[in-house]
Structures are given as structure tokens and as C-alpha cells.
């Protein structure tokens, strides 16, 4: 509300959407076209979900001229934010909305995956529920297919319903070229070079499940996106095998004399020999 108080009423009501988009903490939102906001069909059912609906809509569409005190204005402002968020969830699955969110995705406006193995894959905001006030927004990584919390506390309190549960999947269906290949790389805990027992068992099970999935995809002739990583993993395994062979040759280059062929063992170890007298 500090930003609201810093603007004059005329500036604030004339450029509400610009002010909202440029405010700190609203970087995840894209600007909704005025034509979309003024089409009543796109707002169907929202009048029952938003308090002071008509005043909030007037504020969002820059036609607000209601004279009210600060307390009422604050309530209308809160309703306007909520209304914009609910409309935003509908807008970003339209052709123009997807295009705007794609540009933000390409610029990593939503952040990058913190998982090292994902190589800074850009994230997408999503909700775990389409019902408002159910859960905050999460960030989805298409490479590891996992969810993450936003780093900023300002973003962490945004309602997940303002992005919905389907947006990220629709975007990758419409723009399949930006869908990254799935990563097989995973961290394997080791102690002095040996795999941890529980982690090794889990890794084997995951590997078996992954191989079974790839076999099913190949059977129906669907490109899995794993071919490149399969080739890289085979090259790594061949390099490891070659290093192991070299090490074995180096280790057997100069065997100890006690194991050389034809060398007689010491008399103390011959059968029937008497032990030395003390």
C-alpha cells in the first residue's frame, strides 16, 4: 500500500495495470489485454468470488471514479488484485497469454532450477489447485519434473490459483520446441568411492524403471529424448573401463618376487619343516 499512497489518485486510477505489473513481487504476472478484460464472457462466474466486484473491475479497467475513504479504497484495491489474478489464470492459457508467458520463460523471469543436474533450466509458475486461497504458487522444472518454492518471500505468498494447474502443460504442448530433454543424471552418494547401500539399491530400481519406460516408448516408436544421454553414458562407461584396464596393467608390471614363477618358498613354510628353535 506504500506504492499506492505514493501515487496521486488520477495517476493511480489511469494506469492501474501498469502500476500493478511494475510493482515489486508481481514479476510473475503478464499484462492482460484490455480487450480481454472488457469481454464479459471471460469474467463469467467471477462476480461471486470477488468482493466489491464491480468497483474492482472498474479499477482494473481504468474507469474507477468512485469517491470513497481510505479504508474502502484499500478493500477495493485488495479485491482488484484478486480479480486480476483470477482473470490472469484464464488469460495465460489463451494464444496471446501463452505467447507473453513464453517470452518471460525464455528470459528466465521466473527463475532457474536450483538442481545442479538441470543446468539452470528456466522454471514456470504453477498452482497445485485451481481454487483460490488453497496453496501458494510453486515453480515447475520441466527437466527434472519437480516443484520448488520461490526464493523471494514476495513471490512465495502469491496464490497458486492465479496460474492454475494446467498452464505449464499447455505451454509445452503449444510450444514443444522449448520442452527440454529429460535428464538421467543423478547424484549418487559414495563413501571412499563406494556407493551407499540404500542409495545404490534405490538407484538400481530407478534405473530399471527408466529402462522399462524407454523400452515401452521404443516399442510404440515414440522419441524419448534419452538417445543423446544414452550415447554420453556409454562413452563414459567405455572411458571408465579403459581406465580400469590401464590401472590393472600398471599394477601387474612388477610383481613381488615372492609370487614370481619358480621361486622357492622359505624353509619355514615347507611341509614338514621344523619351526626355528627359540
Image (spheres, helix red, strand yellow):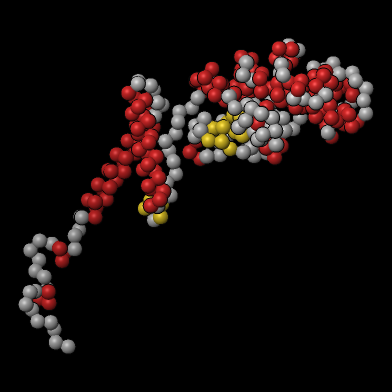
Q: Is residue 258 visible?
A: yes
Query: Which quadrant holds residue 127?
Result: top right
Work out which quarter of the rendered image holds the C terminus and state it: bottom left
Q: Residue at x 56, y 36 (%)?
A: 147
- Furthest toward the front, the residue is 48
Q: Is residue 228 visible?
A: no
Query: Which quadrant holds residue 210?
Result: top left
Residue 28 locus on image (x, y percent): 67, 28
Work out which quarter of the rendered image holds the N terminus and state it: top right
Residue 205 locus on image (x, y percent): 37, 41
- Furthest toward the bottom, the residue is 278
Position of residue 135 in the picture relative to residue 67 (left or right)? left
How many discs appear? 0
Q: Residue at x 83, y 24 (%)?
A: 52
User: Relative to the observer, which residue lies in front, 199 or 3?
Assistant: 199
Query: Which quadrant holds residue 13?
Result: top right
Residue 185 locus on image (x, y percent): 43, 38
Q: Residue at x 85, y 23 (%)?
A: 12
Residue 161 locus on image (x, y percent): 66, 28
User: Relative to the observer, which residue lies in front, 172 or 67?
Assistant: 67
Amino acid at each position: 500500500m506504500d506504492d499506492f499512497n505514493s501515487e496521486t489518485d488520477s495517476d493511480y486510477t489511469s494506469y492501474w495495470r501498469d502500476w500493478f505489473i511494475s510493482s515489486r513481487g508481481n514479476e510473475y504476472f503478464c499484462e492482460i489485454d484490455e480487450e480481454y478484460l472488457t469481454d464479459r464472457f471471460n469474467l463469467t462466474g467471477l462476480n461471486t468470488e470477488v468482493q466489491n466486484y464491480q468497483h474492482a473491475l472498474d479499477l482494473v479497467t481504468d474507469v474507477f471514479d468512485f469517491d470513497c475513504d481510505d479504508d474502502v479504497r484499500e478493500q477495493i484495491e485488495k479485491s482488484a488484485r484478486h480479480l486480476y489474478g483470477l482473470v490472469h489464470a484464464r488469460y495465460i492459457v489463451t494464444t496471446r497469454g501463452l505467447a507473453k508467458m513464453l517470452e518471460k520463460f525464455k528470459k528466465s523471469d521466473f527463475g532457474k532450477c536450483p538442481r545442479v543436474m538441470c543446468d539452470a533450466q528456466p522454471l514456470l509458475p504453477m498452482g497445485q489447485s485451481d481454487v483460490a486461497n488453497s496453496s501458494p504458487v510453486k515453480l515447475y522444472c520441466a527437466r527434472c519434473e519437480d516443484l520448488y518454492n520461490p526464493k523471494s518471500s514476495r513471490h512465495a505468498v502469491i496464490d497458486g490459483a492465479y496460474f492454475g494447474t494446467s498452464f505449464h502443460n499447455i505451454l509445452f504442448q503449444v510450444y514443444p520446441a522449448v520442452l527440454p530433454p529429460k535428464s538421467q543424471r543423478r547424484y549418487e552418494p559414495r563413501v571412499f568411492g563406494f556407493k551407499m547401500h540404500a542409495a545404490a539399491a534405490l538407484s538400481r530400481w530407478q534405473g530399471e524403471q527408466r529402462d522399462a519406460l524407454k523400452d515401452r516408448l521404443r516399442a510404440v516408436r515414440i522419441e524419448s529424448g534419452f538417445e543423446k544421454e544414452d550415447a554420453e553414458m556409454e562413452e563414459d562407461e567405455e572411458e571408465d573401463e579403459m581406465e580400469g584396464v590401464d590401472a590393472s596393467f600398471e599394477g601387474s608390471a612388477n610383481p613381488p618376487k615372492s609370487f614370481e614363477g619358480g621361486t622357492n618358498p622359505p624353509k619355514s613354510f615347507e611341509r614338514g619343516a621344523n619351526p626355528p628353535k627359540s
